[in-house]
Amino acid sequence: MQKSFWQGIYKKLASPKLTVIIFFFLAAASVVGTLLPQGLGEAELQRHYGQRAIWFITTFGLNDLYHTGWFRFLLFLLCANLIVCTIERLPKTLKVFRRREEQVDPQKLTKCSLNCQFTSKLSRDEVEARITNIIAERFGPLQRLDGAGYMGGVAEKSRWSPFMVYVVHLSVLLVLCGALVGSIFGFKGSMSIPEGESVSEVMLEGSDSGLNLPFQVRCDKFNVSYYDNGMPQEFRSDLTLIRNGQEVLKQELRVNDPLTYDGITFYQASYGAILKEAEVELTDRESGAVRRFVAPFREWVDIPGTRYRAQILRFEEDFRRLGPAMILVISRAGREPDASWILIDSDFHGNKIENYHVRVLHATRIAYTGLQVKQDPGAWLVWLGFATMLVGIGLIYYVSNRKLWVWAAAEEPGKRGTKIVIAGRTNRNELSFEQEFKKLCDRLRAELGQEG
Amino acid sequence: MITSSILLGITTFAYLLCALLYLSGVIFRRRTIMFWGSVNGAAALVIQMAGMGLRWWESYQIGYGHVPLSNLYESLVFAAWAIMLIYLVMEYRTKQRSLGVFPAVFAFLAMAYASFSTGVNSKIQPLLPALKSNWLIAHVVTCFIGYAAFAVSFGISILFIARESRHETSGNALSLLPNLRQLDELNYQMVLFGFLWLSLGIITGSVWADLAWGSYWSWDPKETWSLITWLIYAALLHARNMKGWRGSRVAWMSIIGFGCVLFTYFGVNFLLGGLHSYVNIR
């Protein structure tokens, strides 16, 4: 009972129908993943969808579909299907590959879908010589399998071609294994390094946690150049890697030209500016009192002449296309803090918090360079898989296994000439082989002189 | 003074003429007309190549200097070229001229859309830093050869279905077409060829993304849709080889596959762009 259950599963896994079904499910799941925005948080879901839709989305993990268990299960199923199909079929392919024919049977040849037979005027020896030549010219050497009273031979091209399918399947497994290894043993994240500063913490992708590198990355200089229409032309960072206080590597990092150190690769991904500090002027709209202070980014400062404190909480370079803006928080003892977006470059009438009108007198910004950081011990498996896949698919397209059988024997005593039977078979590209076979037969008929 | 836009403009109308010649050849069952269709197609191909070359040169004159494969306009032009090239090579190898209508129409439509749509900017634009890589050429060329092969296969599939639905009569407009078995085999060859190039395209894109962003696969809509397309054609190949599917089932799958190609190419940009823009999420 137990055994037949597993046998049943094994049998299902061995079916090519399952492969096609998995392909369709993977495709359908991927469609859903592109139609529904991925990576939406709880709050965004609440804003866009109704209660039932949210239940559906969160239950099936549709907002992070490609990382859900069921999507991974589909990939796993594909791998299992591939492996079981290989176990089932490879021995048969090997058997066919190893089998050498021992004799040529004219009866069997005439049953091939591609065959031709005719009688030549020439003697058997002459037929033998000419046929061998013509076939060698077009098909490669004829392997002789002569028997009692007849000439037999087989010519074959690309005997190994049926194995290419297995090569492609292996490549898919390699790619998926590489991805698995990378996701378990590697990491992916980003770093923002202000010009002149050193950072060793990488913010990991898809989580709030960071990871400390065993060395520090210093951005000595950041450079960006623009086209005359304002589009960025190129940007690059001069980086120095510092390990235990020692400068171990100094290199320029450009887009499309990553840098690898100690198995960790850095990519020039983005750039921007951060706010270092701002000089702020508050005008009390009732009393007209004006207060000025300098606030470093994300540090509480006392507002002079009051018992209040202020902090710049966030900075955006382009807030809703209105230009640079920051969130200023004013905190008063015993009350909820008040906060608002303040436009930095303009004296906007909406720049207010409670009864204060806010003006930014001066903002000191520094450029930062945005790096992607990655360690992926599985990448080489993926590259190997890619290369294998291309070789496999390429050879499937360009090479097919073609086989040709020849049989010739002198006519029965009393009759002149030689009887000839030829047959051919291919595993792919039948039409062009058919044409080739027809041409070959026509040529043989012409050169060997068909009787009658 | 000859500019690239003049040459590409000529190409557009040359493809229209080419499509009309092939069509009249099939309808009136005149092989000579189809022969002139082929001549016209080959000439248009050459003029278009000159046009693309000139555009390349012009981009250096402006100071941007890049291969003309960088935006929607340039990719449409290249798509038209690739479709016609693949078709003409197939025509030469199979000696079948009667399949030219669809490729010529597609080439014309791609050129016309590129030239006349207000949504397609035909100006030579500078390249963003991330696009400045030789992988751009490898990636775009391989993808579009794949797409073009699928377009030709789509044409063959439509003809297959049209031919199958009619009974064999000699007075039929479709009588110059290859027989069903030939169409099916040609279709399969074309899909396999396209599959090889689509795989190359996805792989070059993946290698390039790894160089530029440090991630060979990030499930962005374009990537995902190219994978969906790959899966559909992979399903077709398996169904044909393992389940013995032939004929109209394969033709229908090829049509669905080409729908995926179109969605990968246009749909992701125009429909998913607003909903799920690459820039917003990142």
Image (tube, helix red, strand yellow):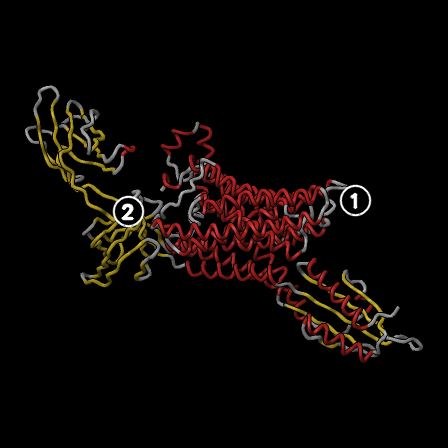
- Quick check: A156 left or right of B108? right
How many marks the image carries: the answer is 2
Q: Which residue is mark 2?
A: A226
Q: Residue furthest front?
A: B1
- The x, y position of residue B38, in whole percent, is 62, 51
Chain of the residue where label 2 is placed in the rendered structure: A
Please give the name of the residue rendered at 76% of the width and 68% of the height, measured from the top-left corner: A443
Please give the name of the residue rendered at 87% of the width and 75% of the height, measured from the top-left corner: A417
Chain of the residue where label 1 is placed in the rendered structure: B
Question: Which numbered dot is residue B170?
Answer: 1
Give the image quarter of residue A160.
bottom right
Q: Could you tell me which secondary element the residue under label 2 belongs to?
A: strand
Q: Residue furthest bottom?
A: A125
- The x, y position of residue B219, in whole percent, is 44, 46
Q: Taking B266 as reference, is A426 above or below it? A: below
Q: Amino acid at mark 1?
A: Ser
- The x, y position of residue A108, in whole percent, is 80, 66
Q: Nearer the viewer, residue B90 or A117?
A: B90
Q: Amino acid at mark 2?
A: Tyr
- Quick check: A54 left or right of B100? left
Q: Taking B126 as reference, is A381 above or below it? A: below
Q: Nearer the viewer, residue B217 or A325?
A: A325
Give the image quarter of residue A275.
top left
Q: Is residue A366 visible?
A: yes
Please give the name of the residue rendered at 82% of the width and 77% of the height, measured from the top-left corner: A150
Q: Is residue A9 visible?
A: no
- Quick check: B134 left or right of A339? right
Q: Taking A443 as reference, is A46 above or below it? A: above
Marks 1 and 2, how far apart in space?
A: 66 Å
Q: Could you tell me which secondary element the residue under label 1 belongs to?
A: loop
> Which quarter of the image is occupied by the C terminus of chain A?
bottom right
